[in-house]
Amino acid sequence: MRLSGRQIDCIRGGRGVFSGLDFEASSGEVLAVVGPNGSGKTSLLRLIAGLLVPAGGSVALEGGDAELTLPEQAHYLGHRDALKPALSVHENLSFWRDFLGGKTGDVGQCLAAVGLGHATHLPAAFLSAGQRRRLSIARLMVVRRPVWLLDEPTSALDTAGQALFVGVMRDHLAGGGIVIAATHAPLGIETRELRMGSAT
Ligand SMILES: Nc1ncnc2c1ncn2[C@@H]1O[C@H](COP(=O)(O)OP(=O)(O)OP(=O)(O)O)[C@@H](O)[C@H]1O
């Protein structure tokens, strides 16, 4: 499987963020998107996820499921953790499992795997920042999708959480998955770098 972008132009709010951007990531690879604040790392992830339309260029996934679109084969984890505060931890993950569909796993097992087994009935509003991030990581596990688009995935994670996340990524890569992660910090795993230009 190969995910690639060719000559992508991104304009936001009438201002050019980047132009003519090329990138490529194959099965088993982590592409770390690095660069200064405002250089367009989040914008690139959102373009790949189909949440933004490029002003030019294209993104394509080769070797995926021909019946599904790229966004249907991708997980997008924003840096703000998309959680519903009034729902419990278990309900939040069940919601995502049912909403995203496809190949799904067991909610309880995934919560236990990310260290939230003790908090399943707590409202998500009560979670700490690191616990919210762990719940987001459980979303990657409960629904299997080959392309992971992650915005600052290790922010707020403690040392144990980071090690846990590296293990989750390794399993994904060993199964032929692709990770594209916008990050300011090392991910603790071998990566190829995509360096974005200066902020505009
Ligand atoms: N909704 C929006 N409307 C207009 N401009 C936007 C919008 N969202 C982002 N931008 C602009 O797009 C540019 C790129 O933002 P983006 O969030 O992609 O950068 P980033 O590299 O992820 O930054 P950071 O390292 O701070 O997370 C910035 O100049 C930002 O102000």
Image (spheres, grey):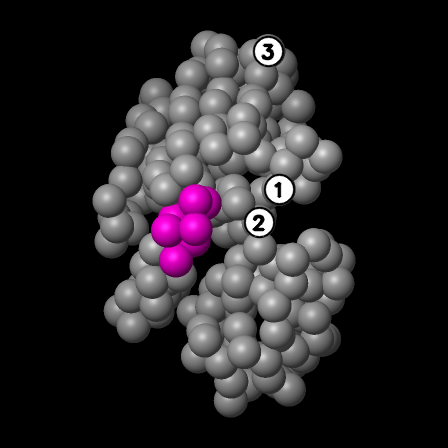
Q: Residue at left 72%, top 35%?
A: 67
Inspect the magenta stretch and tell me whether residue 74 lies in it. no
User: Which element type, helix, strand or loop, lies under badge 3?
Assistant: strand
Given residues 31 and 143, the one toward you in this image is 143
Decide which of tag 1 and tag 3 comes sooner along the chain: 3
User: As shown in the figure, which amino acid type bears the numbered disc 1?
Assistant: Gln
Q: Which mark is residue 145?
A: 2
- Estimate the x, y position of residue 132 in percent, counting from the top left: 51, 68
User: As shown in the figure, which amino acid type bears the numbered disc 2?
Assistant: Arg
- Where 44 sits versus 100, above or below? above
The reply, left or right, for residue 89 in relation to residue 141 is right
- The residue identified by callout 1 is 73
User: As shown in the figure, which amino acid type bears the numbered disc 3?
Assistant: Gly
Q: Residues within 10 Å of mark 2 (few under 14, many from 20)?
A: many
Decide which of tag 3 and tag 2 comes sooner along the chain: 3
Decide which of tag 2 and tag 1 comes sooner along the chain: 1
Q: State which quarter of the image contains the C terminus.
A: top left
Q: Residue at left 68%, top 62%?
A: 96
User: Real-space Cα distance between discs 1 and 3?
Assistant: 22 Å
- The residue identified by callout 3 is 56
Mark 2 lies within 8 Å of ligand 1 (Cβ measured): no
Q: Residue at left 43%, top 69%?
A: 130
